Image (cartoon, rainbow, N blue to C red):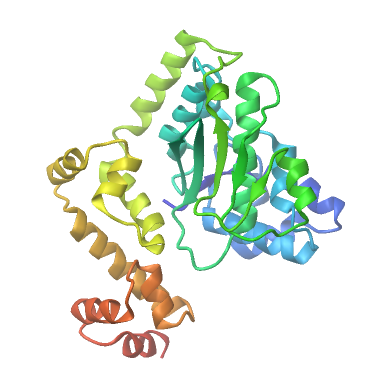
Amino acid sequence: MDSVRGTALLQFGELLAERGASLRSQLSPHHIDLNVVGNYERKFSYRSLVQIFEGSAHALGMPELGLELASRQQSSLLGPLQHLAQTAATAGEGLAAVVRYMRVYSPSILFHLERRNDSTLLCFDNALPCIEDIPQIVEKSLLHGRLLIAELLGAPVQLASVLLRHQPQAELAVYRRYFGCPVLFGQEHNALAIHQRDLQRPCVRHDPVLHGIVRFYLEAHTGTDEKLGFEVERHIHALLPKQRCSLEQVAQLLDLHPRTLQRRLASDGLDFEEHVDRIRRQRAEQLLGQSDLPINQIALELGYRRTTSFCRAHHRWFGIAPIEHRRALKG
């Protein structure tokens, strides 16, 4: 689940070298070989990618690192996913295809589309626990989205706005230069607000025959390997810290009716609430043993509004209080 293609590191070495830093020194602590860099066929940890970008931005004093890297890479999707998007009939259909098959590029990345009046939000999230802000990967991913739309249309696109949950890392003029539109901070979503008229414009490389072939290829190579439970798990991980994890919310993200999702999970021997409970249990043990987060923060990360609710659940899982469990894990 925690993986991304080597193309996510395209141009990263060159950017570091310009700043007097070494690519090897950034990758070696994460045990990533240099031959992974730029290689679509090689994968490495998405969590490591996030940590590398955040650490490099801090070490280099370069708060716009994610934005600059995305602007140099243009599109780092490559492979069949890029061809699928390019050959769609419209930019909107191309984006929808990317959202549907993003797991081919990285199962850790979660995009979804939300309609808002005369615009559509392309919302970015990931399956990592939201322990801390990760602005570099968020800003990089959203700029990739803007660049992808321009690639599909064959011309620059003017977004309605960009929404970011975190506070600005660089000067506001820097954001305006990269995105070319108003950027709003402290928002509910990390998202691009795209004018509906732009999504209805045709892709310049539209090819219905090739589009059908690529879609058939992706269905054949991913449909049997990934069970619905895996897709559901990705969304559960992302929604728990936001206190929004419900069958209805996950069904909406999967474009399914809640009863349909419940029925399909049951056919695979899964119950949604039991699935959430297992994920919470596993994540609780991981956070207690591998982090120094206070108990109340761990409760929030697991989607509990009250610490007492988490403590009751923890006692049901392990038979002891969270603080005792932490001492045992770290002792």
**Left or right for 164, reference 281:** right
Is residue 36 something one can see in this rendering? no
- Image quadrant where residue 62 sits: bottom right
Q: Nearer the viewer, residue 216 or 159?
A: 159
Is residue 126 something one can see in this rendering? yes
State the quadrant of the C terminus.
Answer: bottom left
Q: Position of residue 136 (x, y in %)?
A: 65, 55
**Left or right for 270, reference 199:** left
- What residue is shown at x 26% (from left), y 36% (from top)? 256
Q: Position of residue 172 (x, y in %)?
A: 75, 52
Q: Nearer the viewer, residue 251 or 189?
A: 189
Q: Position of residue 5 (x, y in %)?
A: 55, 42
- Image quadrant where residue 52 sits: bottom right
- What residue is shown at x 25% (from left), y 64% (from top)? 278
Q: Residue furthest front?
A: 117
- What residue is shown at x 31% (from left), y 57% (from top)? 245
State whether residue 195 is above or below residue 248.
above
Q: Position of residue 182 (x, y in %)?
A: 68, 43
- Image quadrant where residue 63 sits: bottom right
- What residue is shown at x 23% (from left), y 76% (from top)? 313
**Left or right for 221, reference 3:** left
